[in-house]
Image (cartoon, rainbow, N blue to C red):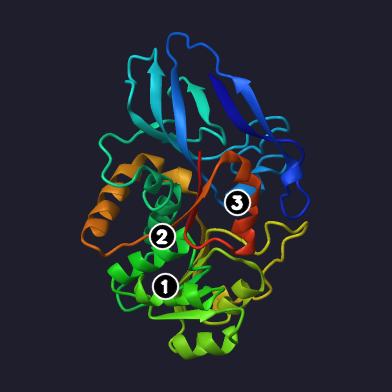
Amino acid sequence: MENKQVVLKRRPVGMAQAEDFDITTVAVPELVEGQVLIENKYISLDPAMRGWMNAGTSYIKGVEIGAVMRAFAAGQVIASKHPDWNEGAYVTGLSGAQSHVVSDGKGLTALGELSAPLSYYLGILGMPGMTAYFGLLEKGKPVAKETVFIAGAAGIVGSTVGQIARIKGCKVVGTAGTDEKCNYLINECGFDHAINYKKEDVSVRIKETCPEGIHVVYDNVGGPLLDLLLTNLAKGARVVICGALSQYNKTEFYGPKNYMKIVTARGYINGIIVFDYIDRYPEAVAEMSAWMEATKLKTMEHIIEGLDNFPKGLQMLFNGDNFGKLIVKV
């Protein structure tokens, strides 16, 4: 049996290119006692991958040159010599951008009987959904009738944050890069307002849509947009830093110039690393599944075919060419 892999060939400078990866095929090794063989069905493409390709360590060590690209995957156990894992079980984990993986079971999550399509466990019921859930509820602490503003709202994290905020009784405003995405946020996700940052004057629109200021900022974008949002904080505002999509491909990050606005707002800035809540994933999955069943929570996927398209898919994340959670179908 052969294993197709996406291997990091060199560290990108700026936007990751196809030449930064090798697509290789290796033999799947024989299992030994205590191991399982997983056939990956779906590979998640996430903005955090760009940081994982850098050298050094932040909250997680960078991928080594010559190693399989780190990625969340959802798959099925097809052979087992491990007492805790049965053939046929569906699992998720950091199994890498490859068609198969041999594992000792550590770091795997058993999905049990699926209550949703398998790919959802890489999106709304996976790491991005958990990031939205815990980032908003634990870090943003929204209160009914407050205004929640999501920078980068059309992605899986942003759109999920907005819907949870609506469930909690908040007013929700966000930014997106196309009219189609803005219409989706309003008509499908229940946002009160969506600002097309490529066509509209964002500064003017923030003041129009958030006349009483912003109580919770959920930032996926960083850069000048975060600066602008900091000038529109309500008293006691909470700023949740989830990502900086506008900065990942730059050699130097744009730092906030208006950070003293958090002082005049008597608020705070905090960050969300979803791995800190891994022990609480089941409670979040249960609640979000119930919201989905009640049609209070929706999701959209953008699935591309084949590991050969992994580099192209990664570029789509940063070009804004995807519409929905971006996933590679192996």
| Pointers 3 and 2 in contact (C-beta within 8 Å) | no
Residue for badge 3: 313
At a point 78% along the width and 56% down the height, the residue shown is: 251
> Viewer-proximal residue, 310 or 170?
310
- Residue name at image x 38 percent, y 56 percent: 133
Q: Earlier in the sequence, mark 3 or mark 2?
A: 2
Q: Dot 2: few (<14), some (14–19), or many (≥20) neighbours within 10 Å?
A: some
- Can you say whether 115 is above or below 132 in the image? above
- At label 1, the amino acid type is Tyr
- Disc 1, disc 2: CB below 8 Å? yes
Report, in whole angstroms, how far the alpha carbon at label 1 lies from the one at label 2: 10 Å
Residue at (59%, 43%) from the top-left corner? 59
Can residue 132 be seen?
Answer: yes
Mark 2: amino acid = Met
Q: In this rendering, does residue 174 appear at all?
A: no
x and y, in percent, of residue 65 in the image: 73, 33
Give the x, y percent position of residue 44: 51, 45
Residue 321 lies in what quarter of the image?
A: bottom right
Q: Which mark is residue 184?
A: 1
Identify the residue at image location x=63%, y=22%: 26
How far apart marks 3 and 1 lie (CA) works out to: 22 Å
Task: Give the Cα distance between marks 3 and 2.
Answer: 16 Å
Q: Which residue is disc 2 drawn over?
A: 300
Asked where in the image residue 257 lies, by quadrant, the reply is bottom right
Quick check: 56 above or below 200?
above
Q: Position of residue 244 (x, y in %)?
A: 61, 61
Q: State left or right for residue 86 relative to residue 255.
A: left
Label 3 amino acid? Gly
